[in-house]
Image (cartoon, grey):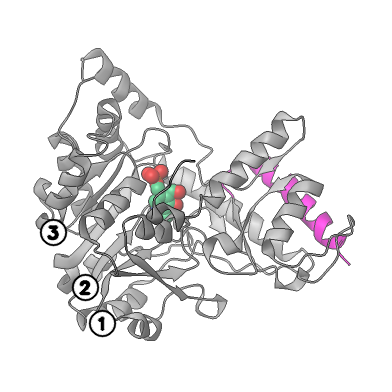
Amino acid sequence: DILLSDALARVKPSATIAVTTKAAELRRAGHDVIGLGAGEPDFDTPDNIKEAAIQAIRDGRTKYTPADGIPELKEAICAKFARENGLTYTPSQVHVAPGGKPVIYNALLATLNPGDEVIVPAPYWVSYPEMVLMAGGEPVIVPCGPNTQYKLTPDALEAAITPRTRWIILNSPSNPTGAAYTRAELKGLAGVLMRHPQVMVLTDDMYEHLVYDDFDYWTIAQVEPGLYDRTLTMNGVSKAYAMTGWRIGYAAGPEKLIKAMAKVISQTTSNPCSISQYAAVEALTGTQDFLEPRRKVYQQRRDLVVAGLNACAGLHCPTPEGAFYVYPSCAGVIGKTAPSGKVIGNDADFATELLETEKVAVVFGAAFGMSPAFRVSYATSTEALTEALSRIQRFCAALV
Ligand code: PLP
């Protein structure tokens, strides 16, 4: 028998990847499946970025690089933080890794000792608690329900902090809810954190560029300079620049932490793909002109999806500020019976039954730590969304 580690035994596989895989299987079997499960832009990577990668290959930039990123990219990241967030960093404060996901994991591996606690507001991105567990820490889940627009409040934060708290993970706009923190809300959380100097802040700003209705985007180190010395401001090119497959994420923070993260990456993956790094330099320093039209398209889709879901019997969908997800409650359909005879006992049943009868893939809320709800990704074509919404409406109307 193969013996597995105790650390891994506590970890769940990614539910979002599982849903995407199941939908792909049904599609291969000939079914007309609409996937609203994956968190991936349907837009293509812009041509100037592709060209920069092709040029990097032609120039022979195909070798090992410094493990945590080339100097040109670190400079470009510092310029991005200065330009877009009013934050001053030097290249020695920057970490680049093969995606935003490993940036977070490297930070946790570099800092957690057994028993150390990491506060994770729920609904959370599926990987946070699992990465904390793999790094030997203890996730402390703080439920943040619809009454607070799925956001953490200062009181809830204060109540969750203990002497063992090492990190709080913030994610704005949020995967899975799309909720984003206003400057005043961040100020409120920062006020609590200023009283607890042992707590470091990991802010996942992956969806920064996807905010709607003139929402004014702020990140916490900018709102409270007093937290600058213990904040890791994380971001990446995957979502904003439609570069999920290129695998480049980055973060900036205190030099001591960045050095420790460099040690982790140097003994694990080594450098992110050299070609992707040159592409990311172009993403961050080249034209930003395509961001605004794409943002507008996402906003139209959000409005379409929120309206369509609110027209479904038993569903209730708030209008979030950003990302490309919505997180409707399905409390109104729990206990009902589907035409198959199956009773919808929880949100996993809802998602399974919806996929099997109407061939629409969504991710059930339990995967994100808040039920009964489900996540819809609207990073897909308007035609596919329109068809999916009419199928969900039909599905809900058929429940008795
Ligand atoms: N953080 C959040 C909130 C995300 O939704 C994702 C991707 O789904 C990531 C980080 C990871 O991004 P990457 O693909 O760059 O690893």
Query: Which residue is labeled 2 in the image?
Result: 224
Q: Nearer the viewer, residue 279 or 371?
A: 371
| Mark 3 vs mark 2: in front | 3
Measured in 3D between alpha carbons, the distance from the residue under mark 3 to the one under mark 2, in whole angstroms, is 15 Å
- Extent of the magenta region: 378-400
Within 10 Å of the Cα at label 2, are there few (<14), some (14-19), or many (20+) other Cα atoms? some
Look at the picture and state if 147 lies above or below 29.
below
Q: Quadrant of residue 65?
A: top left
Comparing 48 with 316, the one in front is 316
N-terminal of the pair, mark 3 or mark 2, is: 2
Task: Residue under label 1, please give it.
Answer: 191
Instruction: Locate residue 396 relative to residue 142 in the image: left or right.
Output: right
Q: Amino acid at mark 2?
A: Glu
Question: Mark 1 is on which residue type?
Answer: Gly
Residue 133 visible in the displayed image: yes
The quadrant where residue 183 appears: bottom left
77 and 358: which is toward the camera: 358
Q: Is residue 383 magenta?
A: yes
The stretch drawn in magenta includes residue 46: no
